[in-house]
């Protein structure tokens, strides 16, 4: 369920602005492959956002850090994924979604956050 929650919430970020660009789609596909989660993708629509948030909220601090980095890497792909440091301060739909999910999931996304290519 943790993999599913991570994938589903990452997908929410990609689709926050009502469109998914090729780089976001490519990163999502890479996540699915890295997580060996092809079968889980079919189940995403069966869970409410509240169930996904609750699952993430119960994760260990290390796993929450991985979720945060996954979200921020997905966030970066809306503009090509070139930068490695991110602030979630703006008013874009992606910013709003990340701030809301971070609140619901108990994940701190304040300050400048640096991430690697793939958080796994």
Image: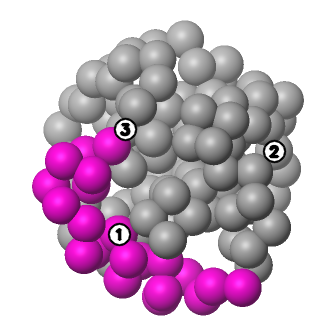
Residue at coordinates 47% horizontally, 24% vertically from top-left? 118
Left or right of residue 2: residue 30: right
State the residue position of label 3: 69
The C terminus is located in which quarter? top left
The image shows residue 117, relative to residue 66, as above or below, that is: above
Mark in the foreground, 3 or 2: 3
Is residue 56 within the magenta segment?
Answer: yes
Give the extent of the magenta segment. Answer: 46-66
Q: Residue at x 36, y 83 (%)?
A: 54
Q: Which of marks 3 and 1 is in front?
A: 1
Mark 3 crowd level (few <14, some 14–19, many ≥20, 10 Å Cα): many
In space, the residues marked 3 and 1 are separated at their CA atoms by 13 Å
Q: How far apart are marks 3 and 2 (CA)?
A: 19 Å
Q: Where is residue 26 in the image (x, y as percent from the top left)?
A: 77, 29
> Marks 1 and 3: in contact by CB < 8 Å?
no
Q: Compute the Cα span from label 2 to label 1.
A: 23 Å
Would you say 82 lies left or right of 98 here? right
Location of residue 92 with respect to 103 vertically, above or below = above
Q: Residue 20, which numbered label? A: 2
Residue 62 percent coordinates (x, y):
19, 47
């Amino acid at each position: 369920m943790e993999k599913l929650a991570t994938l589903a919430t990452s997908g929410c970020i990609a689709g926050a602005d009502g469109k998914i660009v090729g780089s976001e789609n490519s990163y999502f596909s890479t996540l699915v492959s890295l997580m060996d989660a092809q079968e889980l993708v079919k189940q995403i629509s069966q869970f409410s956002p509240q169930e996904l948030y609750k699952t993430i909220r119960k994760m260990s601090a290390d796993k929450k850090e991985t979720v945060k980095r996954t979200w921020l890497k997905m966030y970066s792909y809306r503009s090509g994924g070139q930068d490695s440091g991110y602030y979630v301060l703006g008013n874009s739909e992606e910013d709003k979604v990340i701030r809301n999910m971070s609140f619901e999931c108990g994940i701190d996304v304040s300050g400048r956050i640096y991430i690697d290519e793939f958080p796994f």
